[in-house]
Structures are given as structure tokens and as C-alpha cells.
Amino acid sequence: MLRFLFRQRLRKQQTAGETPQEPVARLTESVKHNVSMIKELLGSPNDLIIREFRIGPHKHLCSLISIDGLINADLLDEEVLRVLLTGRWLENHTAPAEGSALLDLLHKEILSVNSIDRVDSLDQTMLSILSGLAALLVDGSSDALLICSQRWQERPVEEPQTEALIRGPRDGFTENLRTNTALVRRRLRDPHLRYLSFRIGRRSRKEVILAYIDGIAHPDLIAEAKRRLETIDMDEAEGSGYIEQWMMDSFLTPFPLIHSTERPDKTASALLQGKVAILVDGSPFTLIMPVTIGTMFQSPEDYYHHWLISSLMRLLRTVSAFLATFLPALYIALVEYHQGMIPSKLAFSIAGSREGVPFPAVVEAMLMEVTLEVLREAGIRLPKPIGQTIGIVGGLVIGEAAVAAGIVSPIMVIVVAITAICSFSLPSYSFAISLRMLRFLIMLAASMFGLYGIVLVYIMINIHIVNLKSFGIPFTAPFAPFFWNDWKDLILRAPVTVLEKRPQLMQTLDKVRMNKKGGSKGQE
């Protein structure tokens, strides 16, 4: 029922564009009237800067409008105000008597700013002013010159905190959209790299860019990404998380169907595979789509090491994911229901360690897992030096105290510690959280039905994920449907010289990415 209502809402939003829209407000030829309209619509904020002056022998009234804190004041002073007010430009030019001709002269011959646009829309003028541009109005002209003068405080390019590597580049995305697009273009000097700009949010009007490589990405994937971006209708898209949740194929799943990353090299690699990326202004996380379950076990570092080392690391991650999900449940099932499956010496050791523990194994596991999750959350929210201390010392102290008090057994502390370490080895933070959620469900099933409960939940999880899709691509590909060529870069990574083709599941237009024999690259 929820899925049906969600689809109905999307259809209404898609057809909403067919309704008649309000006429676009235009600027007038009166500078004072335009300034009064802008001040009225913006509410005359105290950070609104309006500089009125007159230029030329005809004393045309001009107004330069900007927002304090979003502009490069030095650039406006040196390249705009000083040039116009000193009158030196009159030595080589004759000032026109009409305002529109004067504005055209300023646009094409006088102002030396790198980027200047000419618009006649009041809404576009206000949006540009609120985005850090300066608007120059001239009396007698119904147009405005939008001068690129953006400058605000921003974080420098640093190493990503959530995706640290031993070997690889150290630069990561920032909150500045133009810095992020430059980081991607620095790696992909392909003239077919496309950036499509969208404005998301009725009030925030946040800029969002859809990136893809023309000639590689499938046109249907690009069209679907555009359609979903155009259906977003909210006041403000607070970061990439809102856009990710809106564009997901299903919101009734714990698994991430859109991948987020802070790494430009990972984004560039995804674009070369035929995927699309979404960069959001104000967010250091880029969204990559579509994704499959195999993507969750891959790290950019896999391509910076020898293929044997990378394959071993991927195998370790796969085993770690299995242990992080099923190890506590397996312990509960064996201790509570299937003691005969445990070797005799190990069974005696477990029984001796659990002597005096007043709780069943499932309560033990729940207490320790919940405590671990609380410590993990506290370590994230606290300042970094204190958070690391709380995570390490808190875990040791609480575990030792719980064993000494006889609340939990020592082997349960070992099981929970192994589970936590395994969950930290997964490159995708969102996927690791999904496995942590499923861990509690599997533990409850194991406490009620033993190994049969674990198998039952495992079958249910498989039924769920084989029905998931990410932008039309099955989430379980290339396992199901089966693509043999894509197995070269799945659990094991084949040598680079073997990875001649792009992923088959992406159905890219240009399928060949490497030609070992040399010559021009062909298409199939």
C-alpha cells in the first residue's frame, strides 16, 4: 500500500508540469523601481548591499546589488566600481544616451570581469544575488548584468575522513560545488564529460549537477536520472541524503540503492564504468548510481595494489561481512539448541565460562550488542580525541566489568568483539549499518528456531535483495542475472590487462575500455 501511494505521488508530480504556470516577473527600465522590488521581495535584509552611483556625461543612474559575505568585495571595487566611477573608459568610448545601449557597451567592452551574464528576469536576478553574484542595473534598461563575484569561507581540499586509504590520492570533495566538479574534471580530461545543472528546492534553490560521460553511459539511465531529479519537490534538499532518499527505487529496504562517496577518484572511476553521479552544492558527498551488492565490497585502493593483494582484501571483506551478520546468531543457535554440533572440548569450555551467568545467550548477546552500538554512537558524536578514548576504554572497562560481575560470559565478549571488528572492515558505511540492523533480526530468529531460524531469515533476505533494483539494474547483478565477464572484477580482481571491457550489466555504448594491441579504441 505504501509503495502504491508513493508511486501515485510521483505520477502527480510528473504531471504537475502540464498545469499553467504564473508569468515570469520582468525587470523594468527604472532602477529605483527595480531596487524597491528587490528590497521588498527580500525583506530589506541587513546584509543586502545596494551601491547607487551615476556614470557618463548623461549621468545615468546605476545600482550595484550584492549580499555581504557572499561576494568578493575587492573584485567589485577594482574591476567594476573603480572602472566606472573614474571615467577612464570614456577616453576611448562615447557614452550612449540610452540606458540599454550603455548596458550593452559595459557588457561587451568595458567590464573586464571573467563571467558576466545578461538577464531580464526579476526571479533570476534575485536568485543570482542570493547565490553570490552581483547585479548591475542601469536606468533606462530592462536588463541586468550578473557579475560573477562569488567568494565565501570554505573548507580546503583534505583527505576524506570516511574513506581513508593506505595507497592512493589524498584529496576529497568539499562543500564547494565548483571545487568538486574541478576535482572530477582534473581526472577526466574527456571532452564528452557532461555536467547538467538543476535547481532543487522551492526555497533553497540549491544547485545540483548530474555528471556522466556522453558516449559511455546508456541514454535510458541518463533520462531516468534527469526525470527523478525533476520530480523532487521540497522546500530544501538538506544535503545529498535527501536527494538519495527521494531517488531510491524502494524506501522499504535497509540496503543502500545509491552509493555515496567523498572520493573524486572513485567518482571518476564510476563515470568511466557508465554510471552517473550527482554532485550537490554544500555537500561533500557525491551520489553514484546505479549500484550493486558487489560495489559494497570494493574500495578504490583495490586498483592501486597488485591484483593478488586486492583479491585477498576483497575475500577478507566478504568473510568479514558474513561474520558481522551471522556470528552472534550462530553462537546463540549452537549454545541454545544445537549443543551436539559443538566439539566436546569446546562445549565444556563454553559451559564452564557460562557457569553462573543468569541470562540466556540471546539476552547476553543483546546486552553486549546494544552496549557496543551505544559506545560506537557516542564515539562518533563526541569530539575526536575524547571519542576515540570513550570507544576504546569504554569497551574494555564495560566488557571486563560485565565478565567480573557474572552478567556475561568471556566467550560472548570475544564473539561481540570479533563482530565489531568485522563490521569495521567494510568500505561502505551505509552497507555496514544495514548489516548491523539485520544482525539483530537474525539473532531473534536464532533464539526462537535455532539454525532453522537463521536459514529462514537468510532465505528471506535473498528473496528481498533479488527483487531490488537500482535505476533499473538488479541489485544482485552480476550474480543474478549472471554476467560472466563482470566476475573478473567482483569478489576477485583479475589483473588490469584482463579488464578490457566495461561492466556488461551497465549496457554501456562504448564497451571497450582497453586495447592491449594498441591503435584506436573500437566500439561494439
Image: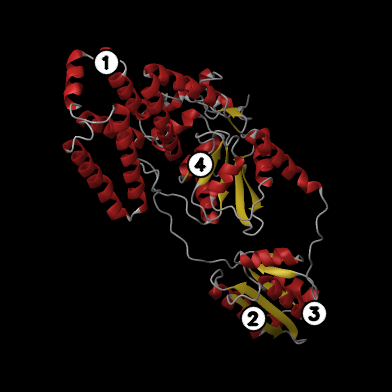
Q: Amino acid at mark 2?
A: Arg
Question: Are the residues at dot 1 and dot 3 in contact (C-beta closer than 8 Å)?
Answer: no
Residue drawn at x 61%, y 29% as measured from the top left? 508
Q: CA distance from mark 2 to mark 3?
A: 22 Å
Check disc 4 and report the residue beneath it: 267
Q: Which is nearer the N-term, disc 4 or disc 3?
A: 3
Which badge, 2 or 1, comes first in the chain's sequence? 2
Relative placement, left or right, of 493 versus 334 is right
**What's the residue at 27%, 34% (across, down)?**
417
The amino acid marked with disc number 3 is Pro
Look at mark 2 in the image and give the residue it sits on. Answer: 51
The secondary structure type at the circle numbered 3 is: loop
Q: Amino acid at mark 1?
A: Gln
Where residue 103 sits in the image (x, y, percent)?
A: 75, 73
Q: Secondary structure at mark 1?
A: helix
Taking depth in this image into account, of 78 and 158 the one nearest to the observer is 158
The residue labelled by disc 1 is: 339
Residue under the point 22% across and 35% down: 407
Determine which of the numbered discs, if any, sits on residue 297 in the image.
Answer: none
